Image (cartoon, coloured by chain):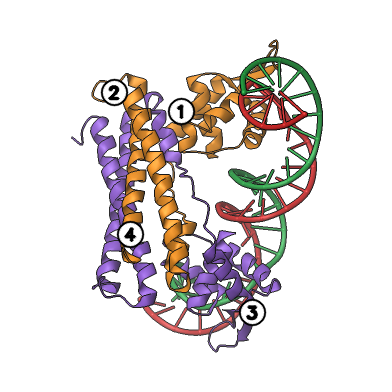
Chain colours: A orange, B purple, C green, D red
Amino acid sequence: MALEHAILVSLAEKSASGYDLARRFDASIGHFWSATHQQIYKVLGRMESEKLVESNLVPQDGRPDKKVYGITADGHAELHAWLRQPSRPEALRSEFTVKLRALHLADREALAAEVQSRRDAHEAKLTEYESSEVRFFPEPSRLADDQVGPWLALRGGIRVERNGIEWCDEILQALGGPA
Amino acid sequence: MALEHAILVSLAEKSASGYDLARRFDASIGHFWSATHQQIYKVLGRMESEKLVESNLVPQDGRPDKKVYGITADGHAELHAWLRQPSRPEALRSEFTVKLRALHLADREALAAEVQSRRDAHEAKLTEYESSEVRFFPEPSRLADDQVGPWLALRGGIRVERNGIEWCDEILQALGGPA
DNA sequence: AGGAGCATGTAACTAGTTACATGATTGT
DNA sequence: ACAATCATGTAACTAGTTACATGCTCCT
């Protein structure tokens, strides 16, 4: 299961509570694997019973106590085993593309509007990624060892968004030009 | 649910049995939305009870009888309603990218091999898509009305694969050059 | 004799989503 | 007073995967 491994990767960087993980899955790692807090708690529970992670309760004042999870030796072993074996290539699944195939049945105006809003979303993400790049990886030629992976992941995100924008433009043009 | 709508799109093109649909979901429409025969049969059953599709049994000789499904008026209505409303933008979910982020914990050789095999897979798909393009859409500037959508979908696939190849090359270079 | 293609399904399971639930503190 | 943030969960449901099951025909 992928969420399990995403959690192991995240906890290997730094121990965290379920809540902390949920926030990470809203940002950094969540750009490539999303998860809600509900599912994170569920999976953490199972992972604890499988001894991949262990928790200790940290009392706080002015705030609710939290359960901070850390990765165990078994967790590290599982993580390394997963890293060693190739993951199956993920087939692309796009509801939008299914819809696009049915273009001749659709309202062109409505579809063009949808494409435009997808383009805007790609643009927004691209801007976000690009500013992350300049902030966190200003000198990509000399990165610390543990920064290469995150940088390459971000590069992938940037590529996906740029590609998405170009494709939207191609569609808009085919739909009758962007006015 | 997206499979439901993918089936409606496919049946709107042409009536088909569950088996036929399963083959379509291995090829054309399956490039953007995959489904196994088990799930197709399950969903077809529900869709029939919801009167979105209707079936009639076609006896064949030398072969098992088949249940040919066609789209109903309700099905068309549902399809058009779906086409009119924007689909939520799909977040990208990539197990590989999660792994890439953990590059510093992984075996570089093994990861490079995995990247190379992903690159090969992208290359193979790209070749397939490109030959589909020349075969089915030799003159993209003058396409029949119902060919524009499928062509744009294919263009999206081509873009995704090309982009995937470029990203793989970027990763391989960062991992120490492609020898 | 064996495998591929045609044709349809059931059953058990895993993963993920949506809705609901609680309760304190801090900021506007 | 109201919303946001911190913090943890349960319950019900939907979607999708994997394994199992049957049986006929055509090709090699």
The three-letter code of the residue at mark 2 reads: Pro
Q: Pinpoint the chain carrying mark 1.
A: A
Disc 2 and disc 4 in contact, CB within 8 angstroms: no
Do the residues at discs 3 and 1 belong to one chain?
no
Closer to us: A133 or B122: A133
**Figure check: B111 above or below B155:** above
**Figure check: A124 above or below A135:** below
Quadrant assignment, res A123: top left
Q: Is residue B128 left or right of residue A101?
A: left
Q: Is residue B116 left or right of residue B9?
A: left
Give the percent coordinates (x, y) of residue A109: 44, 65
Q: Which mark is residue A80?
A: 1
Closer to us: B63 or A24: A24
**Figure check: A59 above or below A75:** above
Q: Earlier in the sequence, mark 1 or mark 4?
A: 1
Q: Nearer the viewer, mark 3 or mark 1?
A: 3
- The structure residue drawn at horizontal position 36% and vertical position 44%, both measured from the top left corner, is A161
Quadrant assignment, res B59: bottom right
Q: Nearer the viewer, mark 2 or mark 3?
A: 2
Q: Which residue is mark 2?
A: A138
The three-letter code of the residue at mark 4 reads: Pro
The three-letter code of the residue at mark 3 reads: Glu
SS at circle 2: loop
Q: Nearer the viewer, mark 2 or mark 1?
A: 2
Give the percent coordinates (x, y) of residue B80: 55, 70
- The structure residue drawn at horizontal position 35% and vertical position 30%, both measured from the top left corner, is A131
Alpha carbon of mark 2 to alpha carbon of mark 1: how far? 30 Å
Do the residues at discs 2 and 4 belong to one chain?
yes
- The structure residue drawn at horizontal position 46% and vertical position 56%, both measured from the top left corner, is A94
Q: Which mark is residue B54?
A: 3
